[in-house]
Image (spheres, rainbow, N blue to C red):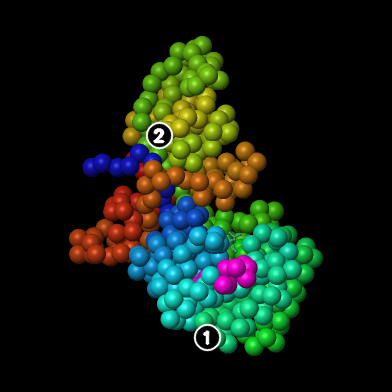
Amino acid sequence: MTSPALTATVDLGAIAHNLDVLRNASHAPVMAVVKADAYGHGAVPVARAVLAAGAAELGVAHITEGIALRAAGIDAPITAWLHTPGADFDAAIANDIEVALSSPRQLEAVVAAARRAGVRASVTVKVDTGLNRSGVAVDEWDVFVREIAKAHAEESVVLRGVMCHLARGDEPGHPLNDEQAGRLDRAVDDLTRAGVAPEVVHMANSPAALTRPDLARDMVRPGIALYGRTPIPERGDFGLIPAMTLSAQVALVKNVAAGEGVSYSQTWIAPRDTVVAVVPAGYADGVPRLLSGHLRVRIGERLFDGIGRICMDQLVIDLGPDGAGVREGDEVELFGTGRHGGPTARDWADAIGTIDYEIVSQIGNRVVRSYVDPQAPGPAADDDSTGDPRRAAGGGQGDARRPDDWGGEP
Ligand SMILES: *Cc1c(COP(=O)(O)O)cnc(C)c1O
């Protein structure tokens, strides 16, 4: 049986657990953020899993991301909040994607699309309360309120939501969080006075959902915590479980003599005769080249150092003079849950001065996603359940294993 060279195993049970953690902490319904292919975890299977586990809605950046979810048959509410003048608002309306608006120009474009379709478009207002990124700017606010009240009266739009995004959600005690909440509440008041009261108000990202239930309003909007990564490392892991394990099969095992250099520019010279393994994972797959010399992987119960430059498709690890019994085809864990002392995406992020959000969302398309779903039928039921979308979403990888089981693999 063939098996992929490089696999990102996504534990949908962990994601369902993380959703529970977020609901318990925030006491609010969850709009699960599945933008950027669910932070690299696979938008469609993750969306199905979170909805099955009780998420109320889905959030994405681009309308096109929402349309892809619709095309996969997902019918839950979807909000998209990042648009250029070329965005396809007609398609958003046709696919029942809720558009979050950041300017009077975007409002005007949606109104035009709604008129063309002869329908009333459901919209959210994204208010810039201090992040100074997306959202209706302070100096356009009065015009925006006037225009949306007009569009509402003409029945081209209906206002469903008002949202903003926090700049310092990961510093729960920072006064800016309360200032942003106050500005959001005042924006809701302005809209209500103009005759367009929203149904739902939301602002909390992962760190706020976990630490500031008082900011939840009607819904929270977490992303990273769903994937099991703490948004505030100094505060611990909140009981979240990392959902993605990146693993590869050893492609080649070979001897390298003392004094020989390994990989481009030969930045690593063998200090003694040794055995090395080639791992088919490189920077095109999301292993940052900057990790060269700072990478540590796990095979079975042992950790091994990456040596030399990380290349586009491959990297090399040192197995030591005795080769540690590692054979071609053995499974290498690049990062996972961190249980049993294994490497984590956080270790990578720390080593190169970034955050693990970037690490997981950079995992490339060549990496086969394999889904572990505790709700799905087991292998015995496979034959009669080939139509189960959850298994189909897994790309037919019948060999998905829980990271926990790895230590016990033969
Ligand atoms: C990405 C994003 C989120 C989720 O943020 P996390 O920090 O991953 O929880 C929420 N809202 C908006 C507008 C976003 O862009």
Q: Is residue 28 or residue 218 the one in the foreground?
A: 218
Q: Is mark 1 in CB contact (under 8 Å) with mark 2?
A: no
Decide if residue 203 is on the left or right side of residue 89: right
Q: Is residue 215 or residue 371 the one in the foreground?
A: 215
Of all residues, the one furthest to the left in this rendering is 383
Residue 117 is situated, as x and y percent measured from the top left of the image, at 42, 77
Ranked by sequence position, the earlier of labels 1 and 2 is 1
Of all residues, the one furthest to the right in this rendering is 175
Decide if residue 407 is on the left or right side of residue 239: left
Residue 373 is situated, as x and y percent measured from the top left of the image, at 38, 61
Q: In this rendering, is residue 79 above or below 227?
A: below
Q: Please report the bounds of the magenta region as a residue range.
A: 97-108
Ligand 1 occupies quarter:
bottom right
Q: How many marks?
A: 2
Q: Hey, which quadrant is residue 225 in on the image?
A: bottom right
Q: In this rendering, is residue 239 above or below 251?
A: below
Q: Amino acid at mark 2?
A: Pro
Q: Which mark is residue 155?
A: 1
Q: Determine if residue 76 is in view.
A: no
Residue located 48% across and 13% down the image: 260
Residue located 55% across and 60% down the image: 84
Q: Determine if residue 288 is in view.
A: yes
Residue 302 is situated, as x and y percent measured from the top left of the image, at 48, 35
Alpha-carbon span between mark 1 and mark 2? 56 Å
Residue 323 counted in the magenta span: no
Query: Are there few (<14), some (14-19), or many (20+) residues within 10 Å of tag 1?
Result: some
Q: In this rendering, is residue 195 above or below 74?
A: below
Decide if residue 308 is on the left or right side of residue 218: left
- Secondary element at image label 2: loop
Q: Hey, which quadrant is residue 66 in on the image?
A: bottom left
Identify residue for label 2: 280
